[in-house]
């Protein structure tokens, strides 16, 4: 495959295994570029990208901005907290006003699941979902899978367990969809109240015992408890969560194998992951962040290439 099957990146659900492989092959090349003394290529010259963030972000936002700069795109950044959204403007009006300034691509993070899909039905620009509520976070899943592939060569048969708040996590859903498309075996582990009821339909194993889950997996992708998305109490207290589901060095030392530790960030140190694990040689958390730039460069480049044909 030499081009993506889709004009937008709305979710992993909407793309093919071949799309993912093409993104990875392209990201390999961009990773070489960003490790050169001169990190910039002219691939997106004269392309304008709007980064529309209706929800907080550190990694995704900076990563997209850097990816766009490395590709020589022109960028505009929008933050809902300092915009006319506060005065009651609709999402479509906001975006159409920005697009009338001749914007080609839109990167959007929004608290409403489906906001990127909704936009893609109403506007011409390429849409990239940078996280929509509790739904999907496709670029995170792609950089996570890319980082596992970088470590092990491929994902076929690899055992990946996602720990934590699966119920409220867009990273969990996108990871499950991405990893299973690539042939990995996937498990989830967390309190029963934070495991969605429909999880069986996604073809994943469910484990409630952290030690058993760690013994099973090659890779532990650890998520944080999303307190901001919990309208009722799903766990008695953070301390109890840490006691039952937190991962610490003693647990890893007790295994008869090595487990690769991942986390999409932001980490709640001492809650889901102890600092001596987050900062250990087992951890590839900062490699994930580095790979995010190359993977997002690949996505921007491949979507922009589709506009030329
Ligand atoms: N992983 C992730 O989405 O982090 P941010 O919320 O900081 O973008």
Image (cartoon, grey):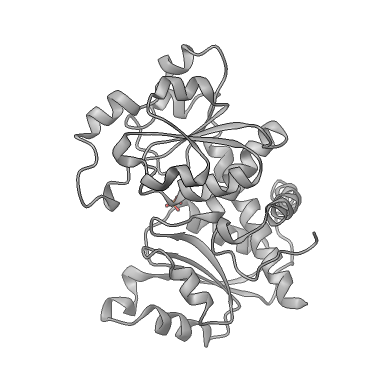
Q: Return the residue found at the far bottom.
A: 100
Where in the figure is residue 58, as x and y percent of width and height?
Answer: 43, 53
Q: Is residue 221 visible?
A: yes
Q: Could you tell me which residue is drawn at 35 percent across and 37 percent down?
A: 268
Vertical position of residue 198 compared to residue 155: above or below: below
Location of the N terminus (image quadrant): bottom right
* Residue found at x 20% / y 43%: 233
Residue 290 seen in the figure: no
Residue at 48% across, 23% down: 214
| Quadrant of the snapshot with the C terminus | bottom right
Q: Is residue 29 above or below residue 235?
A: below
| Percent x, y of residue 90 | 35, 81
Q: Residue 23: which quarter of the image?
A: bottom right
Residue 134 or residue 287, whichever sits in front = 134
Eyeballing the image, is 46 above or below 23?
A: below
Position of residue 245 measured from the top left corner of the image (x, y, whole percent)? 34, 28
Instruction: Return the residue nearer the eye: 302 or 112.
Output: 112
């Amino acid at each position: 495959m030499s081009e993506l099957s889709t004009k937008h990146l709305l979710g992993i659900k909407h793309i093919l295994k071949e799309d993912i492989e093409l993104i990875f092959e392209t990201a390999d090349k961009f990773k070489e570029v960003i490790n050169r003394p001169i990190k910039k290529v002219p691939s997106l010259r004269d392309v304008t990208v709007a980064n529309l963030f209706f929800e907080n972000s550190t990694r995704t936002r900076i990563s997209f901005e850097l990816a766009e700069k490395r590709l020589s795109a022109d960028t505009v950044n929008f933050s809902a907290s300092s915009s006319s959204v506060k005065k009651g403007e609709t999402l479509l009006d906001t975006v159409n006003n920005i697009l009338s300034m001749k914007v080609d691509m839109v990167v959007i993070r929004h608290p409403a699941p489906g906001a990127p899909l909704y936009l893609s039905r109403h506007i011409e620009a390429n849409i990239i979902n940078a996280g929509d509520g509790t739904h999907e976070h496709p670029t995170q899943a792609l950089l996570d899978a890319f980082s596992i592939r970088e470590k092990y060569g491929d994902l076929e048969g690899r055992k990946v367990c996602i720990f934590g708040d699966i119920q409220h996590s867009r990273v969990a859903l996108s990871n499950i969809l991405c990893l299973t498309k690539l042939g990995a075996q996937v498990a989830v582990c967390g309190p029963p109240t934070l495991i969605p009821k429909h999880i069986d339909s996604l073809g994943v194993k469910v484990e409630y015992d952290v030690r058993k889950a760690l013994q099973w997996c090659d890779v532990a992708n650890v998520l944080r408890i999303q307190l901001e998305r919990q309208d009722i109490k799903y766990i008695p207290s953070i301390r109890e969560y840490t006691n039952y589901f937190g991962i610490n060095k003693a647990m890893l030392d007790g295994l008869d194998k090595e487990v690769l530790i991942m986390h999409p960030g932001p980490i709640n140190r001492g809650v889901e992951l102890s600092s001596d694990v987050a900062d250990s040689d087992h951890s590839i958390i900062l490699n994930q962040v580095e790979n995010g730039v190359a993977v997002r460069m690949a996505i921007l480049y491949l979507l922009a290439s589709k506009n030329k044909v």
